Image: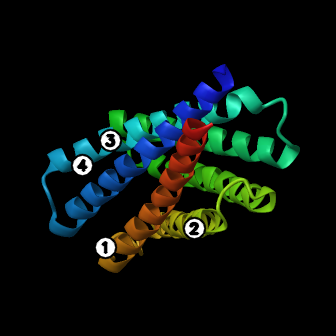
Amino acid sequence: MLSSNLSRRGGLAATVTAPLFIVADLLGLFTVSFQGPTAAIIIQNIIAVGAGVLLLLGLIALYGPHLEAIDTPSLLGFLVIFGGLVLAVGAFMWAYSLGEQGWSLFFIWTSLVATLGWILIGAVSLETQAYPRGVVILHIVGAVLYGVANALIGSGAQSGALAGSQNYVVGVVIYNVVLSLAMGLFGLRLFRRREES
């Protein structure tokens, strides 16, 4: 019963996290596109960090009770996602609190680590057929696109080549929204499945 309640709460956390990340992405897009007020970037950062922490709690609730029973690829995926998210949220908060730009590259690379975990979890979910195939494929595609976008940011962050590209920023936001929607669908599916049982 405790395991079922934790899984439901993890599903709810993932479901709530998705729109929070989407709002943060759209605020970031607004701020970059229209040179919006500084307050919008502050709000976007607060929402993104809050959503990241909520996602971490959701991952613990989803996988914590099952860690002894899951197979090696799932455990590896969980650990990679969890480690990458902890480092990414920590780097994001650290860079924001100090106002340093040097940590942004570290944030991007830790996000890539988390993305590899998302892809691994998606592949395991596809193999085990634990979720609908369409949701899993959307999740994997979103994670791959998000990873490619972050890799491009990482390579362009040092040279500044991508900093002013409006099309690039829009593309990154679209990829983030796809991944967030997939996370939300995973969470909603899990939340509803546990509610029905």
| CB contact under 8 Å: marks 2 and 4 | no
Determine crowd level at label 1: few under 14, some 14-19, many 20+ residues with C-alpha closer than 10 A.
few
- What's the CA distance linking mark 3 and mark 4? 10 Å
Q: Position of residue 56 (x, y in %)?
A: 55, 35
Q: Nearer the viewer, residue 67 or 193?
A: 193
Q: Nearer the viewer, mark 3 or mark 1?
A: 3
Label 2 amino acid? Leu
Q: Which residue is painted at 35% across and 34% down in the image?
A: 98
Determine crowd level at label 2: few under 14, some 14-19, many 20+ residues with C-alpha closer than 10 A.
some
Can residue 95 be seen in this snapshot? Answer: no
Can residue 157 be seen in this snapshot? Answer: yes
| Circle on res. 164 | 1
Residue identifier under label 2: 138
Colour mode?
A: rainbow
Indicate which disc, 1 or 2, sits on the residue closer to the N terminus: 2
Question: Considering the numbered disc 4 on the image, is that residue within a helix, a strand or a loop?
Answer: helix
| CB contact under 8 Å: marks 3 and 2 | no
| CB contact under 8 Å: marks 1 and 4 | no
Residue identifier under label 3: 47
Q: Answer above or below: position of 67 versus 74.
A: above
